[in-house]
Amino acid sequence: MRIDVVSIFPEYFAPLSVSLMGKARERGILDIRLHQLRDWAHDVHHTVDDTPYGGGPGMVMKPEVWGEAIDSVCAEPPPDAITPRLVVPTPSGRRFTQQVALEYAAEPWLLFAPARYEGIDSRVMAEYASRLRVDEVSIGDYVLAGGEAAVLVMVEAVARLLPGVLGNANSVTDDSFAPGPMQNLLEGPVYTKPPVWRGREVPEILLSGHHGKIARWRRDEALRRTYERRPELLTAVQDLDKADRRALADLDPDLG
Ligand code: 6GU
């Protein structure tokens, strides 16, 4: 997968060379290209922002600079893919979820355009929407100082889904928000050796070797944790079996 990122802080993306994503890049699974937005600003100060029409606080990123940047990144396509999917992080975007991460992982080419200040002149998104798929996305209900951290979050969520990036192929299918039996369930607690630490014991069932009972216990713990921490997710859990309903009824008679 090819990923281009255009930013006034390309150095912000140093973590993309570490760990999982660093390895994926070395192996050629991920082709990440970072670009300095100011390279497409032609005045002596390499200005990328200006005051907002209509007044108000902050600055808005200039359309001409972004237009040249996106045009020139798009002019160097990878062998097969014709155009990238343009992803513009913004707190006013649609929510980035595991479902969106799975969609992005199936794309050959993503172009991220993280903004600073109050955002990018809206005509940029309108212009490229006539040529590319353009997504304005938010990673959650809080406000960051810029889109860079959101790009790091999204690239990591997408990269770990690419074939060959994670060691264990199962680890993706067991994800809390992945389609399948665990969808919309939070994963329960996990333990490793020693069996007793500071007087705290590992739940006995996990040492029993009864794989069926362990699976049931894990599911009960997932249901419990979801009920306690994210009750709004429970209404979206699919295919509850008899034992699931019993576990939920034990937590809250209204759920049985
Ligand atoms: Cl994508 N950008 C910024 N600046 N703040 C955010 C966000 C994105 N998602 C949540 N907060």
Image (cartoon, rainbow, N blue to C red):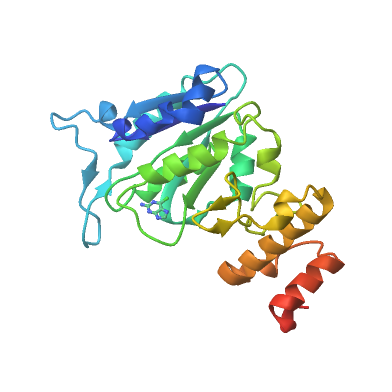
The answer to whether one can see residue 86 in this image is no
- Above or below 17: residue 106: below
State the residue in front, 157 or 111. 157
Query: For this view, does 120 lie left or right of residue 132?
Result: left
Q: Residue at x 27, y 26 (%)?
A: 39
Residue 166 percent location from the top left of the image: 61, 31
Q: Position of residue 164 (x, y in %)?
A: 64, 26
> Which quarter of the rendering shows the N terminus?
top right
Q: In this picture, is 59 found above or below 128? A: below
Tell whether 241 sits left or right of 72. Answer: right
In the image, farthest residue toward the left: 44
Report which quarter residue 183 is drawn in: bottom right
Instruction: Residue 17 in the image: state x and y as whole percent.
Output: 42, 26
- Give the position of the C terminus as an image quadrant: bottom right
Q: Residue furthest right?
A: 242
Identify the residue at image location x=24%, y=55%.
52
Q: Is residue 68 shown to the viewer in this render?
A: yes
Q: Where's residue 202, x and y in %? A: 62, 54
Identify which residue is drawn at 42% across, 24% down: 33
